[in-house]
Amino acid sequence: MGRTAWRAGVSVHRRIHRRERISFIGLLAAGALGILGEAAARFGWLVLPTGLPFPPEALAQGLFAIVPMDLFSLAIGWLGSAAQWIAFAVMLVLWALVVGALSNLVAAVAAGGGPLVILLAGALVGCIVQGAWWLAAPVLAPGGWVAVGPAALWPGVLLPAGAYGVAALVARAFRRPRY
């Protein structure tokens, strides 16, 4: 008797909490949208530039700082003048995966609230990420907070926040049920 009730509970649980699979294309698409918003804010495509470091660029510079000189010399000797661009492309893909994973996480957590809740939750995560980059500006940006300034937080956060919100919607659209 107890065993039958347990099985019925499991099937109800499976119907309520549907397991979903993350699409790799959706992961990269959501990441690319988030990166476009960050690039638009950083390089001033639609508004004045924020002065915040572009995340893949800052990550590539951080990588150059921690890689031992012997390994760095070997990589430059092997790749030649393309080493800088290859490192930047690798960091761009890695940051796209991070942003895509954040967007998928937001889409999964806020899925029950509908598209507007997903959009707003993604925008909130975008604000948090931009705030973290602003707090890290003294270490990452040349000139620190003097070069970045408070405009990086407002209104400079609007483009990345909007892009993260749309990225969360795209991530939700690419999620598929797991059977």
Image (cartoon, rainbow, N blue to C red):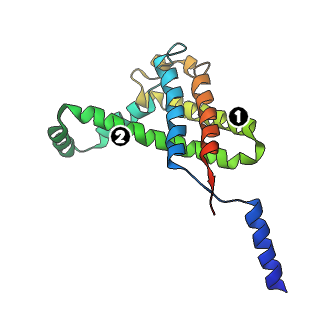
At x 55%, y 21%, the residue is 152
> x%, y% of residue 95?
45, 39
First in residue order: circle 2 vs circle 1:
2
From mark 2 to mark 1, how far is it between C-alphas?
30 Å
**Residue under numbered circle 1:** 120
Question: Which residue type does callout 2 highlight?
Answer: Val
Query: What residue occupies the far left of the structure in this picture?
Result: 77
Residue in the foreground of this view, choosing between 12 and 35: 12
Q: Quadrant of the N terminus?
A: bottom right
Residue 109 visible here: yes
| Number of residues whose C-alpha sits closer than 10 Å to that of mark 1, classed few (under 14), some (14–19) or many (20 or more) | many
Quick check: 72 left or right of 14?
left
The C terminus appears in which quarter of the rendering? Answer: bottom right
Q: Are marks 2 and 1 in contact (CB under 8 Å)?
A: no
Q: Position of residue 119 (x, y in %)?
A: 68, 35
In the rendered image, is residue 62 in sight? Answer: no
Q: Is residue 166 left or right of residue 9?
A: left
Classify 178 as above or below 139. Answer: below
Residue 32 location, x and y as percent?
49, 35
The foreground one among 144 and 161 is 161
Q: Secondary structure at mark 2?
A: helix
On screen, residue 17 versus residue 134, left or right, reads right
Q: Residue furthest bottom?
A: 1
Residue 8 picture location, percent across and down: 81, 75
Residue at 49% across / 41% down in the picture? 28
For disc 2, the marked residue is: 90
Task: Name the residue at 48% across, 32% down.
Answer: 136
